[in-house]
Amino acid sequence: MRKKILWAVLVLVLVVLGTAAWFLYKQPAVKFNGERTVSAAPASFSLRFSVLNTAEVQTLAFKEGDALHVSWLIESGSVDLVIGMEEETPLYQANGRGKGDEAAFDLPIPKSGDYIISVTGKSARGWMKCTEAEEGLT
């Protein structure tokens, strides 16, 4: 009887340790390590990250005819980028950007308002910038 109890306790301990190890492996301890910069004039939002395991979100105001210069370089992991107005179809969306992915382009702003920029990473390292272009695309 005593052997059965010891075996049951041992199995229970192994299950608890296995569950804890799985949870720690699946849940990165560090959510963000890097630099986050925001400016109102000119409107800009930039991230430089050695670790990105969360969503970084910023709202910037633009006027119709403005342009947003968007650029990034992803060194590792995976990054999603969404730019748009609340409760509207995104103006721009890029999902699953990974190692070696880089881009630089101007995004025309179709109407005045507050635009939400969301950058979500998973084990990601790299940088991303969204800066109001000096001259609009008019």
Image (cartoon, rainbow, N blue to C red):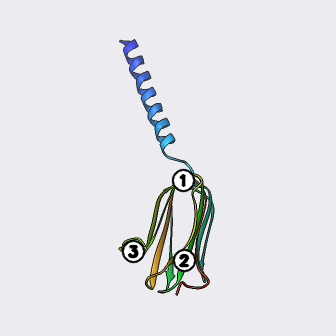
Q: CA distance from mark 1 to mark 3?
A: 26 Å
Q: Residue, x 41% and y 76% (percent of image)?
A: 85
Q: Secondary structure at mark 2?
A: strand
Q: Nearer the viewer, residue 116 or 90?
A: 90
Instruction: Identify the disc placed on residue 98.
Output: 1
Instruction: Identify the disc placed on residue 68.
Output: 2
Q: Residue, x 62% and y 83% (percent of image)?
A: 134
Q: Residue, x 49% and y 46% (percent of image)?
A: 27
For marks 1 and 2, the one nearer the N-term is: 2
Q: CA distance from mark 3 to mark 2?
A: 17 Å
Q: Compared with residue 38, is residue 119 higher up or lower down, i.e. above or below?
A: above
Instruction: Identify the disc placed on residue 37.
Output: none
Looking at the rendered structure, the kind of residue marked 3 is Glu
Residue under label 3: 86
Looking at the rendered structure, the kind of residue marked 1 is Gly
For marks 1 and 3, the one nearer the N-term is: 3
Task: Examine the image and state in which quarter residue 86 appears.
Answer: bottom left
For marks 3 and 2, the one nearer the N-term is: 2
